[in-house]
Image: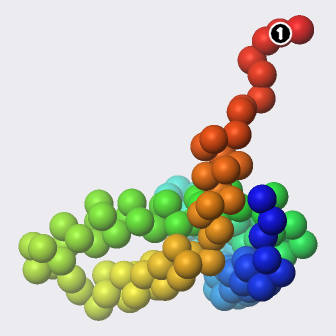
Amino acid sequence: MTISVFRLYLLRAGYLLIALAMGGLTWPEILDPAADWSFNQGVVRCMLGALTLLCLLGVRYPLQMLPLLMFELTWKMIWLARVALPAWMSGHIDDGMAENIFAVGIGAIYWFIIPWRYVIDRYVTQSGDRWAWR
C-alpha cells in the first residue's frame, strides 16, 4: 500500500510535536540533578523521555515507527476511559485533572494522522513472522 507524501509529512509533524512539546517538558526534569521523584514519578518521566527520543526516529522513519503513535493513542484513550470519564461522571474534576484531560485529549489528533488502512494491512491482515524453530 502506498502512503501519500502529504500523509507522511502529517506523521512526521505528529512525531515532531511529541518530541518537542513533551520533550521540552520532560527532559529538563530528567536532566535536573536536584529532582527527587517517587518511584512512579520516575517511571513516568523516564518512559516519557524514551518516547520523545523514539519520536525523533519517527520523523525519519514515519511508517516503521507507527507502533509508537499507536501506543501513544492507546494509552491516552485508556486513561480517558478509565480515569477521566469516571471522575467526570462522579463530578470530581479538579483543576489538575482538567489540565490532564486537555493535554491527553490533544492526542485525539492522532486518530486523523495515523493511516488506519495501512495499519490494518500491515498489522492485521498481513501474515505474521513464522514461529517455527528452523
Q: Residue at x 66, y 46 (%)?
A: 123
Residue that lies at the very extreme toward the front in this rendered image: 1
- Total of numbered circles in the picture? 1
In terms of secondary structure, where does tag 1 sit?
loop
**From the viewer's perspective, is 48 left or right of 103?**
right
Q: Is residue 5 left or right of residue 100?
A: right
Question: Can residue 12 be spotted in the picture?
Answer: no
Q: Quadrant of the rendered structure where residue 128 is?
A: top right
Q: Quadrant of the C terminus?
A: top right
- Rendered location of residue 104, percent (x, y): 45, 78
| Residue designated by label 1 | 133
Q: Residue 84, position in %: x, y?
A: 28, 72
Q: Type of residue at label 1?
A: Trp
Residue 100 left/right relative to 42: left
Quick one: 99 or 132, which is closer to the camera? 132
Q: Residue at x 83, y 81 (%)?
A: 5
Q: Nearer the viewer, residue 72 or 26?
A: 72
Residue in view at x 29 percent, y 91 percent? 95
- Residue at 79% across, 12% down: 132
